[in-house]
Amino acid sequence: MEGKGKLTKEVVAQEARFILDSILNSGAYPQEVQYEDLRRQCEKSVSLRLLDYVNFLERFGYLTYDRATHLISTTSDGERVVSGEKMAELVIDVVHHFRPILARTRSGKEDSNARARRRGSGSQNAPGGGGTSGGGGGGGGAARIDERYEKLSTLGSGGIGTVYLARQVPLGRDVALKEIRELFGFFTEPQRQEIVRRFDEESRKAAQLSHPNIAMILDGNTSRDYPYLVSEYVSSGSLRRVLKRAEKIPPELSVKVFLQILHGLGHAHQRGVIHRGLKPENILFDRSGNVRITDFGMARVVERDQAVIQHVYVGMGSVAYMAPELFTSPKSLDKRSDLYAVGIIFYEMLARKLPGRRSAMPTELHEGLPKVIDDLFDKLTQDDPEDRYSTVDEVLEDFYKSTESKDYLEPRGAVLFLDNPLDELEMKDEEPEDTPEGGGFDGGGDDDQPVDGAEDVSLEAVHASASSHAEALAAEPGLEVVESSGGTPMEGDDDDFADEGTGSKRGGGRRARSHRPYSFQQRIKEREK
């Protein structure tokens, strides 16, 4: 089959059928094929990127795509399209999904250059992939964006898009380029426009931040088919990577990382910027081992104001760090929601697991920790935001006014590192890593891996949920984001319960409560049944 010069609904439908037929005749049993094999077989014969067709066919139930194994297989509806039974329905679905592209070609506004941009190079079309073909000097050159950036390799892929290591061509420096792409496959044009509007708004806010503990925004373009954001490349990986691989994290290091996170957040909060989705995946480390927070406001891009849900492709790790009020009233989000996440992250660094309903206090885990650490953790993670700290300054004031904490830090009390302390950590062997090491992207990287203690929810289930709800979204005004089938808040370890009368665990002399409240965990579980 040869790709057509002019795009019509009939052409797209026939090309979609051609792709389904290629899967059915792949020779595999059951009829399934690897994404890359299908791309090599079909992409030169169709008018759009293969990924555009895959997202479309998956959205309307004609195929399934396992993003863990990259296996694509047809459904019974897909087989009926190939046999000709459902071609009429397929054409209707094509019109619904590809309306913006069809409208441009019908009006004659899409010239040959636009078609070339729409098709792109083959190396760009792999899901989560991005222009790696030119990185090795083999041929063709790396994929360029706006003639200013070359995609060199993929750093990670997740809920909102894909993070690439890229080269800023005019200056010859490495940057992290974050591109919204796969997410668009589940939304109509008005919803995509709302996503882009929010992406632009949050990117502009984040670009105003300048602090040693915040990854700097350098550039961006939201007027392209696939908007992107460019930030500095942060080279020493994420906190999630440290939590996964470090044999031991010295409590002194945890305290300094905690303070650096607070200083970075304080700068943002003073300028009216709330992170909204803080977690170990978007806490990065530079070459000196200092914290660089990234992804400010990115959770807002696909956030639904009026419902108790997180975004599409919700990262299994995200929910553990979300303050309770975000599940019941997202509009009530403020600085205190960020501070709740900081408290959970701090405890995870100290305990190497998330806090449970009656977890040991930090000073029970590490002798020599200042007692004020217990008080900070307790107040940061109160269920009721009214009982938490209101500002970063309040947290820092309580920490620094303690004589114990002053003695605990090195004599000069320095918080920033000159020599990377991560180099001194004993690390486990590297496992295959999806983390956007050089610049997180909310919902990306390790977000696609369960945090210790989390329920294992497959990406396939999340995609199935997104696809099944996409139709309903079109009927509602504004952006209406698909509810994920996964991401239940974690309760912590049951063995963290204290024995009656021992007082040795959470609750000895303090009000026993959940740091991820049991009440809203139960409500969400009941809703899922």
Image (cartoon, rainbow, N blue to C red):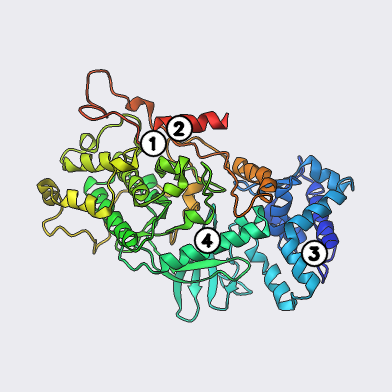
What mark, if any, has residue 516 been given in the picture? Answer: 1
* Mark 3 surroundings within 10 Å by alpha-carbon count, few (fewer than 14), some (14 through 19), many (20 or more): some
Do we see residue 441 in this rendering?
A: no
Q: CA distance from mark 1 to mark 4?
A: 28 Å
* Mark 2 surroundings within 10 Å by alpha-carbon count, few (fewer than 14), some (14 through 19), many (20 or more): some
Q: Which residue is mark 4?
A: 198
x and y percent of residue 296 in the render?
Answer: 42, 59
Front-lying residue, 247 or 367: 367
Residue at 31% across, 29% down: 358
What mark, if any, has residue 521 been given in the picture? Answer: 2
Residue at 48% across, 57% down: 298
x and y percent of residue 460 in the render?
Answer: 62, 42
Q: Earlier in the sequence, mark 1 or mark 2?
A: 1
Front-lying residue, 185 or 22: 185
Q: Splitting the image into 4 quarters, where does residue 267 fall?
A: bottom left
Do we see residue 458 in this rendering?
A: yes
Label 1–label 2 contact, CB within 8 A: yes
Name the residue type under label 1: Arg
Name the residue type under label 2: Gln
Front-lying residue, 476 or 409: 476
Q: Earlier in the sequence, mark 4 or mark 3?
A: 3
Q: Earlier in the sequence, mark 1 or mark 3?
A: 3
**How many marks can you see?**
4
SS at circle 3: helix
